[in-house]
């Protein structure tokens, strides 16, 4: 990559993973790698239900948050994201503008609380019109709900 070239998504992911490798516990980094491999395979599969199996080892909050961060880089091609606590152990990743917008964060938290309270079934997990997932760019709709409650 030349000094003035814009890094590709793959390069951004590789750089981010290199920093994680240097600062994470090796076992947790390996778990993160297995989760990411599973996520890529799951997303490539047909259907709308994507589950990442982690085996017996429960991911730490750090592993879950880094999982979200890496998937956000893959999805958007940028590292400009913020982790936002949605309550009850759920976390999402929002673009910087949405994360700094109290109203957008409030709406995302309310939507997440409704999803937890309603036990949304198939076809019900996507926010409806006017909800965070259907918002304009720069609002809460660019989030990805986390892999579940943190341990």
Image (tube, rainbow, N blue to C red):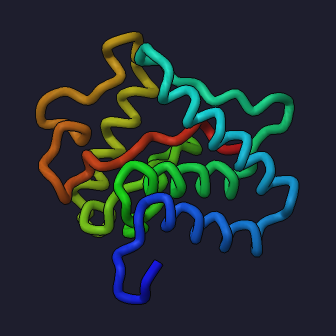
In the image, is 80 to the left or to the right of 116? left
* x and y percentages locating residue 96 in the rendered image: 32, 68
In the figure, 5 relative to 106: above or below?
below
* Residue found 31% across the figure and 36% down from its top: 111
Residues 51 and 18: in front is 18
* x and y percentages locating residue 55 in the rendered image: 81, 29
* x and y percentages locating residue 148 in the rendered image: 59, 35
Residues 147 and 67: in front is 67
Outermost residue toward the top? 122
Q: How many marks?
A: 0
Outermost residue toward the bottom? 3
* Residue found 58% across the figure and 35% down from its top: 39
In the image, is 97 to the left or to the right of 46? left
In the figure, 105 relative to 31: above or below?
below
* x and y percentages locating residue 103 in the rendered image: 21, 57
Residues 30 and 92: in front is 30
In the figure, 97 relative to 65: above or below?
below
Quadrant in which residue 36 is drawn? top right
* Quadrant, the C terminus: top right
Using the rendered image of the protein, determine whether residue 119 is visible from the camera's viewpoint. no
In the figure, 20 relative to 33: above or below?
below
In the image, is 137 to the left or to the right of 33? left
* Residue found 45% across the figure and 52% down from its top: 74
Using the rendered image of the protein, determine whether residue 134 is visible from the camera's viewpoint. yes
* Residue found 86% across the figure and 60% down from its top: 26
């Amino acid at each position: 990559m030349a000094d003035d070239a814009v890094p590709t998504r793959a390069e951004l992911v590789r750089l981010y993973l290199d920093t994680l490798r240097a600062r994470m516990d090796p076992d947790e980094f390996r778990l993160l790698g297995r989760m990411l491999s599973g996520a890529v395979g799951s997303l490539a599969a047909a259907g709308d239900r994507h589950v990442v199996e982690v085996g017996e080892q429960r991911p730490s909050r750090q592993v879950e948050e880094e999982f979200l961060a890496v998937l956000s880089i893959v999805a958007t091609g940028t590292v400009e994201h913020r982790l936002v606590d949605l309550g009850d152990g759920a976390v999402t990743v929002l673009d910087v503008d949405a994360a700094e917008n109290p109203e957008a964060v409030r709406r995302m938290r309310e939507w997440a609380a409704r999803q937890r309270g309603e036990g949304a079934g198939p076809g019900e997990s996507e926010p409806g019109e006017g909800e965070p997932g259907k918002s304009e760019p720069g609002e809460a709709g660019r989030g990805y709900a986390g892999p579940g409650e943190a341990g």
